[in-house]
Image (cartoon, grey):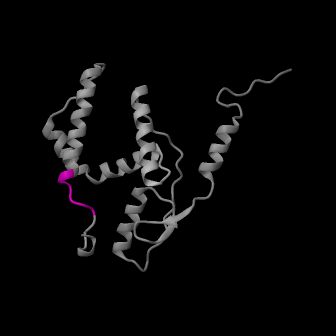
Amino acid sequence: MAKLAPKDERSFSPIAHKLLDEVSGPTRSWNTVSGVTGELRSLSAISRIDEQETRDDSSRSVETVERLTRQMRYGATPGEEKETKDFIRRLSSATGLSLTHSNLMRSCRDLLFQIEDKLIDEIRRANLKRPINDKHAIARFESRMMDIIRTAIRQSPLPYSRSIDDQ
């Protein structure tokens, strides 16, 4: 007599298994922004370490690195998907880096976190309302959000101080 698998159990997928092995495996070493060799970190983890370094360089400890186990998605048209993939391919080709969509999105996310206060001020000043089920209104709304984000970035001070040698 055959047994039924529990409803929440998934069938074995060699691709998913390989992906899980790659994601959950040991992280690679690289030089961080401050020049200290450490484990691969997201920009938010690097900024936490940089803050810790400025407090006390001698007593700095290595932080535990979270694994990338969640996916965050957003809706896009086939044309937007193609444009984004082409853009990432152009950046990778021009810079010699193997960039991914995730690399860029996490960087943009961290940038938005850094300008949060100015972004809140600008959104409040714009008095926006998010439209629902109106493609043209949503496009105008997102275009206006892009302008607001650009303004907030320009108004925010750089998170580091430039030395005379950098200029």
The structure residue drawn at horizontal position 48% and vertical position 65%, both measured from the top left corner, is 63
Q: Is residue 128 left or right of residue 28?
A: left
Percent of width and height locating residue 10: 67, 31
Is 53 within the magenta? Answer: no
Which is the main secondary structure of the residues drawn in magenta?
A: loop
Relative to 95, residue 17 above or below:
above
- Most foreground residue, 135 or 100: 100
The quarter of the image holding the N terminus is top right
Magenta highlight range: 154-159
Where residue 89 sits: x, y (%)?
Answer: 46, 43
128 sits left or right of 15 in the view: left
The answer to whether residue 55 is above or below residue 72 is below
- Would residue 158 be counted in the magenta stretch? yes
- What residue is shown at x 23% (from left), y 28% (from top)? 140
Residue 131, by quadrant, is: top left
Q: Position of residue 157 (x, y in %)?
A: 21, 59
User: Eyeballing the image, is 100 above or below 51?
Assistant: above
